[in-house]
């Protein structure tokens, strides 16, 4: 019976299938893609570390550590030593400079993975006698060719070859500048490592097959006395990148829920229209003695079958999305991802699709209760869809809400997140629903237009059963998501780029040695960059004791939490409270007290995390020397300011004698020439100083934000697509009626132009309301994210605010008019002769 | 006023040709009232539709007020209908989104008439629906809807009026009222009228009765 029921009117149910397919496709595409990505990372984990395990530290390794790492040498273990740091490279004439990521090495790097060099000769050979291997980007920037020389630190190096691929390089999107490889011995001779350098020291180990990597890792970890040294096996390679990718995956999975909910709305819509057409059947079945339950069962079985079919269609779509995604994500990926079929993702997609469809079928199917057998005698009633009674509707809504929270919790892996997300989507839908209803009410209130096309077009929107509200909500949701992404992105970028006041510093210098401070000032003066410059001392330190507890003995809930406390901090001393800082507890010290007392001022959020209060003890470990301080104040810091900020500011007395380097912010003369001149002057006089050009950093941040936004926009595209499916569904549902009306108009003398105009007005109105409401809701969300979460001033580009509704209207007109062109072309007689 | 020569219409349903009209010749002078009768399925509606240019004939020619329909484009046909024709359908065919008054005004508005609304209102009063102008078709009874449709057909004062079983969907008392109205309107305007009906009594009021059978003219009698 169920099968027989479907056979009639199946075209209408095409939209049921499509609605489900889009959401399932997005989910399966993302789940498969990330599963394949994780698989690839796991498979290539050794390559991503280029070793079996690594020791990392911000300090050079001491003899003890080296000895511990050498314990397996007799059994065939091999070691390589690396030092990675940012540095400045320049033409030998000093006219062009570039920030680079320097990697100095000794030994057989890499143990795993391939280093692709040009010419294809062994790395050691190329690096011999002061050779360096660089990425081509550096040569393009400096206008230098292979074989010529480049200045790094206090000496110059011959470019011996090009680096084409490096196994353990994280995505280029995250890097500061092009890579330079050199021999470890040369780093020392060029004086590149000074007290202020941010060096990451690494000891890579490759183990012979008979040794177990995990066992060696834990044995080594236990043997090392120095807690500043971290030991990691290849399985934990690239932790930051993996964390980033995992977050991205979780977010995207959750984001597919928007598409699924829209798909659900589409399902509800198709079922409602379907049932409306099937009212006679329902009434006849009831007259023949079928109970409401039996009739409902027939339709539930149909829904189930269609849901399975739609989900199956979604699997195909997912396979397609999975192929496209790598291109969208692009450089963010450290490894190549193959588009393999992932059974788990497919199963999940099927299950989620079926559950979503059934949840959304519930409400319209309840209407079967409302169909009276006697209805068969009153045909004219059939134009109005039946509704279920109030109690049943409330119950259905509760089941729907609960089911959605469950789905979201499953997708997000957390009940809490799931509930928040569903709440957010429900709130957005509610706002959109109310706004759309208000928009339609406004249209209805409008004085009847003089023009026939306008009156007819708008009348079609506001007539009962027009489904305009449903379409507006679903399209509006998609638009809202896009508007939010667009506005947050432009808000972020405006913050980083354009909004910076003209006198804000545009250069950041690190690694200035104490005896270079005065020459550096003189240099700034000579470059016209003295005004507004700031120089701050920096000391590298770790926390040793916090409020009477030894950090080494603390227990942490997670690794990331542990890292946030045990990591190395750049701390400073200051007499005066720096700009952008505000004391929220305790008092700021006087210059006299700063020379007398060992005090510290702690940043607000960190103080909260460490449970530190004014008056408590805080002990720092500065390269093995303990420095005890008392918390004198807690500060709120405006992190949005483009300047050096510190978690800990100490009194000068506390840090007297600590190994110190200085950092500076300054503003060059305007224009690229001014920037180049300042950079070149600094590097010529003080090759150990690293200059970071804000413009360059902004460019890289922009590129990264663009990529991420691209991925998110891809998801938003899926929800807009779901909205368009709903639009198409609603058009199909009204097609019959429209054919008849078009025929009447033509019989009365209306040309096709008149009909086209009224259609265009109808869909432009629909798209304009949906687009405006969606943009406003999206702008509200973006405002919340920018001002409440990120603390960035709200900024609304007029182009986006006006453009989105117009584009939406254009798209709706295109879809609507396109779908109904056939209606206009039809000959009137065939339509009007009937009855 | 209406000149039909050798009109045929063949439909293809499921690949099989089905000839509905077999060469109709008919001349209706201006001001004449012609009733078309014949059994169901004899081709009456098809003929009327072809006269109105609502479909294209397979062969033959149709001229309205000297203007040949065959060969005209969609939009030219629509404009011609707007100028010369009123049409009343069996199932009313009002636009459900427009009020009664707006429905009546449509033909005038399509011509760009400036005082469409007052004229529509006046004609609605003539058919006895002065009070119902702001009602939507769904809120009117069948007889009222057909009266609105009559007003709509006459509002532009077309030289030709075509009506296809205008009382077919109404009970006889209501049908009588509608017909009386139709006759009254025609008498007032002197419109040429072609009316399809099964009602012999009604046919008796016509100047001429044409009977169709299997797509051919079976008889053509002048009322005496
Ligand atoms: N679109 C169509 N497809 C198939 N047959 C049609 C179509 N239109 C009309 N016919 C057939 O043409 C014949 C004449 O129809 P019609 O003009 O409506 O007759 P009448 O109005 O006299 O009852 C009928 O047999 C009908 O079945
Ligand atoms: Mg007929």
Image (cartoon, coloured by chain):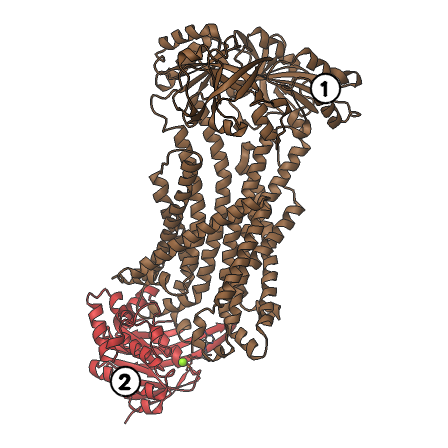
A206 over A425 or under it: above or below: above
Residue A392 percent coordinates (x, y): 52, 65
Residue B89 visible, this orientation: yes
Q: Which residue is mark 2?
A: B33
Residue A320 visible, this orientation: no
Residue A654 percent coordinates (x, y): 50, 12
At x 78%, y 25%, the residue is: A209
Question: Quadrant location of residue B125?
Answer: bottom left
Relative horizontal placement of residue A56, taking residue A691 as reference (left or right): right
Colour of chain A, in one word, is: brown
Shown in red, the chain is: B
Front residue of this view, candidates B95 and A706:
A706
Q: SS class of the residue under badge 2?
A: strand
A17 over A338 or under it: above or below: below
For label 2, count other residues whose C-alpha is less than 10 Å away and answer few (under 14), some (14-19) or many (20+).
many
Mark carried by residue A197: none
- Disc 1 within 8 angstroms of ligand 1 (CB): no
Relative horizontal placement of residue A74, taking residue B38 as reference (left or right): right
């Amino acid at each position: 019976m169920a099968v027989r029921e479907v056979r009639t009117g199946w075209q209408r149910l095409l939209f049921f299938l499509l609605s489900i397919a889009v959401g399932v496709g997005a989910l399966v595409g993302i789940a498969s893609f990330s599963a394949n990505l994780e698989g690839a990372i796991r498979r290539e984990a050794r390559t991503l570390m280029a070793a079996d395990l690594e020791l990392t530290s911000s300090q050079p390794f001491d003899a003890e550590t080296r000895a511990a790492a050498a314990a397996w040498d007799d059994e065939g273990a091999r070691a390589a030593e690396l030092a990675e740091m940012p540095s400045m490279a320049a033409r030998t004439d000093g006219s062009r400079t570039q920030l680079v990521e320097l990697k100095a090495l000794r030994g057989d790097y890499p143990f795993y993975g391939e280093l692709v060099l040009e010419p294809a000769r062994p790395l050691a050979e190329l690096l011999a006698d002061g050779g360096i291997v660089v990425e081509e980007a550096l040569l393009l920037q400096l206008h230098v060719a292979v074989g010529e020389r480049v200045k790094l630190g206090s000496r110059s190096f011959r470019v011996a070859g090009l680096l084409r691929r490096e196994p353990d390089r994280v995505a280029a999107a995250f890097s500061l500048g092009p890579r330079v490889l050199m021999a470890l011995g040369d780093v020392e001779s060029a004086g590149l490592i000074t007290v202020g350098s941010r060096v990451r020291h690494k000891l890579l180990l490759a183990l012979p097959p008979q040794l177990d990597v995990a066992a060696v890792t834990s044995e080594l970890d236990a043997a090392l006395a120095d807690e500043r040294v971290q030991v990691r096996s290849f399985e934990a390679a690239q932790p930051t990148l993996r964390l980033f990718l995992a977050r991205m995956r979780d977010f995207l999975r959750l984001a597919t829920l928007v598409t699924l909910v829209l798909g659900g709305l589409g399902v509800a819509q198709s079922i409602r229209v379907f049932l409306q057409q099937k009212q006679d059947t329902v009434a006849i079945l009831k007259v023949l003695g079928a109970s409401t339950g039996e009739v409902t069962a027939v339709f539930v079985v149909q829904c189930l079958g269609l849901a399975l079919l739609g989900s199956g269609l979604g699997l195909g779509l997912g396979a397609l999305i999975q192929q496209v995604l790598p291109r969208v994500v692009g450089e963010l990926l450290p490894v190549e991802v193959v588009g393999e079929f992932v059974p788990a993702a497919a199963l999940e997609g099927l299950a989620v699709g079926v559950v979503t469809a059934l949840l959304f079928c519930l409400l319209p199917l309840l209407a079967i209760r409302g169909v009276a057998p006697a209805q068969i005698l009153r045909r004219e009633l059939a134009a109005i869809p039946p509704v279920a009674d109030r109690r049943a509707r409330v119950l259905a809504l509760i089941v729907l809400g609960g089911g959605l929270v469950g789905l979201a919790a499953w997708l997000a892996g957390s009940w809490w997140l799931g509930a928040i997300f569903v709440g957010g989507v429900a709130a957005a839908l509610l706002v959109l629903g109310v706004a759309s209803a208000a928009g339609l009410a406004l249209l209805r209130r409008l004085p009847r237009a003089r023009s026939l096309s306008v009156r007819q077009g708008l009348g079609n929107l506001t007539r009962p059963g027009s489904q305009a509200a449903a379409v507006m909500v679903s399209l509006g949701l998609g638009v809202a998501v896009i508007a939010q992404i667009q506005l947050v992105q432009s808000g972020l970028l405006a913050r980083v780029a354009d909004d910076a006041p003209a006198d804000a510093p545009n250069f950041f210098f690190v690694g200035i040695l104490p005896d270079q401070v005065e020459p550096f000032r003189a240099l700034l003066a000579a470059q016209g960059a003295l005004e507004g410059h700031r120089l701050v001392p920096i000391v590298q330190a770790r926390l040793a004791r916090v409020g009477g507890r030894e950090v080494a003995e603390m227990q942490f809930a997670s690794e990331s939490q542990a890292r946030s406390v045990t990591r190395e901090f750049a701390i400073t001393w200051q007499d005066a409270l720096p700009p952008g800082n505000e004391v929220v507890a305790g008092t700021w010290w006087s210059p006299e007290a700063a020379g007398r007392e060992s005090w510290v001022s702690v940043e607000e959020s960190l103080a909260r995390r460490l449970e530190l209060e004014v008056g408590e003890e805080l002990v720092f470990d500065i390269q093995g020397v303990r420095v005890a301080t008392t918390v004198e104040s807690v500060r709120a810091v405006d992190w949005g300011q483009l300047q050096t900020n510190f978690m800990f500011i100490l009194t000068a007395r506390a840090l007297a004698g600590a190994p110190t380097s200085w950092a500076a912010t300054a503003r060059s003369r305007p224009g690229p020439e001014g920037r180049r001149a300042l950079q070149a002057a600094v590097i010529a006089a003080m090759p150990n100083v690293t200059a970071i050009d804000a413009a360059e950093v902004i460019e890289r941040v922009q590129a990264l934000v663009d990529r991420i936004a691209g991925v998110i926009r891809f998801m938003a595209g899926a929800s807009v697509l779901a909205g368009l499916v709903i639009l198409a569904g609603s058009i199909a549902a009204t097609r019959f009626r429209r054919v008849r009306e078009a025929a009447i108009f033509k019989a009365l003398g209306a040309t096709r132009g008149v009909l086209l105009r009224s259609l265009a007005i109808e869909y432009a109105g629909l798209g304009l309301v949906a687009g405006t409401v969606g943009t406003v809701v999206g702008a509200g969300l973006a405002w919340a994210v920018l001002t409440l979460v990120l603390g960035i001033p709200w900024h609304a580009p007029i182009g986006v605010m006006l453009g989105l509704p117009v584009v939406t209207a254009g798209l709706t007109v295109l879809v609507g008019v396109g779908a109904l062109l056939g209606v206009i072309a039809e000959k009137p007689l065939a339509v009007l002769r009937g009855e | 006023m209406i000149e039909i020569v050798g009109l045929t219409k063949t439909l293809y349903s499921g690949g099989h040709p089905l000839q509905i009209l077999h060469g109709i010749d008919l001349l209706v002078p201006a001001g004449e009232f012609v009733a078309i009768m014949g059994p169901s399925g004899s081709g009456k509606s098809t003929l009327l539709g072809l006269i109105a240019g609502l479909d294209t004939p397979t062969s033959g020619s149709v001229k309205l007020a000297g203007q040949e329909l065959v060969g005209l484009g969609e939009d030219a046909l629509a404009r011609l209908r707007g100028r010369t024709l009123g049409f009343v359908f069996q199932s009313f065919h009002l636009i459900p989104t427009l009020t009664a008054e707006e429905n009546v005004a449509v033909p005038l508005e399509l011509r760009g008439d400036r005082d469409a609304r007052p004229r529509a209102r006046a004609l609605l009063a003539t058919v006895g629906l002065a009070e119902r102008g702001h009602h939507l078709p769904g809120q009117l009874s069948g007889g009222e809807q057909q009266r609105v449709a009559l007003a709509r057909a006459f509002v532009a004062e077309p030289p030709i009026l075509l009506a296809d079983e205008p009382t077919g969907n109404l009970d006889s008392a209501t049908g009588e009222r509608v017909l009386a109205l139709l006759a009254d309107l025609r008498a007032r305007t002197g419109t040429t009228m072609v009316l399809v009906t099964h009602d012999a009594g009604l046919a008796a009021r016509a100047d001429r009765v044409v009977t169709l059978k299997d797509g051919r003219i079976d008889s053509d009698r002048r009322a005496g």
